[in-house]
Image: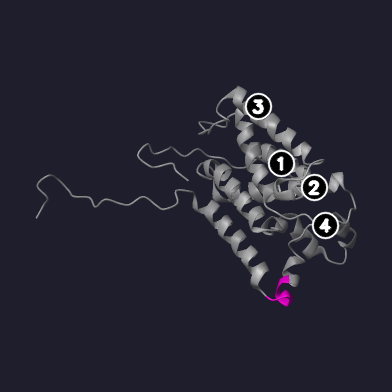
Amino acid sequence: MQHPFGTHQPRRNPPAFNAPGIVLQIIVVTVLMHVFRLVAPEAWVDPVLTYLVFNPGDLHFFGDYPVEISARWVGYALVHGSWLHLMVNCAFLLAFGTPIARQIPKLSFLALYALGAAGGALAVLIVYPGADLYLIGASGGVSALVGALSRMVFLRRGQEYVPPPFNNRRAGVIFILVFFGVNLLFEFLPGPGGLTVSGESHLGGFVAGFLLSLLLPWRHRQRDPHHGHGL
């Protein structure tokens, strides 16, 4: 029998996490890699890490290990030194990645994130050519997302949804200046908890993301006013 007040539509509960799938998938893979590194036998972990830790000094051995060293330009984004390091990067990935992933193709988002990580590694290589140091963490890729949002302060590609503070020219410029200033300070001061923070990888990722957001396939998705926007 037809419902007397029209077709009855069952009420749908909102999703527990209202973030794009691609963002959550990157977070899950990153967390699983950290757990694997902590609990798996060293005999399993060490061979995997040969593909996932960037070291400028190892580029001298590219001829002998081309696959391993090539993978490190992006793979280092999956490795973190502590739970604090991991959680901070995942939180920023969720915050800055969500408004971008809602508007662009998944492949463009992956390219932006991965090439941003490579841009961070390139910046470290430029500043410390041939140095024997280890770069890990997703902050280069996350900084590329910040760079893509910062591009919206100055130039829009179509009818983009631009979140604050990037939707205001003055606030956006202040944010960018603070971002650069803080990361330059990391060259002289320790990060939170006494951690060593690679400010140059953040800046390299930022520049890569800014430029890539002008080149990658980009599209606008209409926002549904009835759909929640919580993270």
Residue 174 numbered mark, or none: 3
Q: Which residue is mark 2?
A: 122
- Dot 4 surroundings within 10 Å: few (below 14), some, or many (20 or more)? many
Structural distance between the alpha carbons of marks 4 and 3: 33 Å
For disc 2, the neighbor class at 10 Å (few under 14, some 14 to 19, many from 20) is many
SS for dot 3: helix
Which residue lies at the image location 44% right of the left edge and 48% below the top edge? Answer: 18
Secondary structure of residue under mark 4 = loop
* First of labels 2, 1 by sequence position: 2
Question: Residue 57 location in percent, x, y?
Answer: 88, 57
Colour mode of the rendering: one colour
The kind of residue tagged 4 is: Asn
Classify mark 2: helix, strand or loop: helix
Which sits earlier in the primary sequence, circle 4 or circle 2? Answer: 4
| Left or right of 128 in this view: 166 | left
Q: Amino acid at mark 3?
A: Ile
Give the magenta part as a residue range. 41-45
Tag shown at residue 104:
none
**CA–CA distance between discs 2 and 1?**
10 Å
Q: CA distance from mark 3 to mark 2?
A: 26 Å
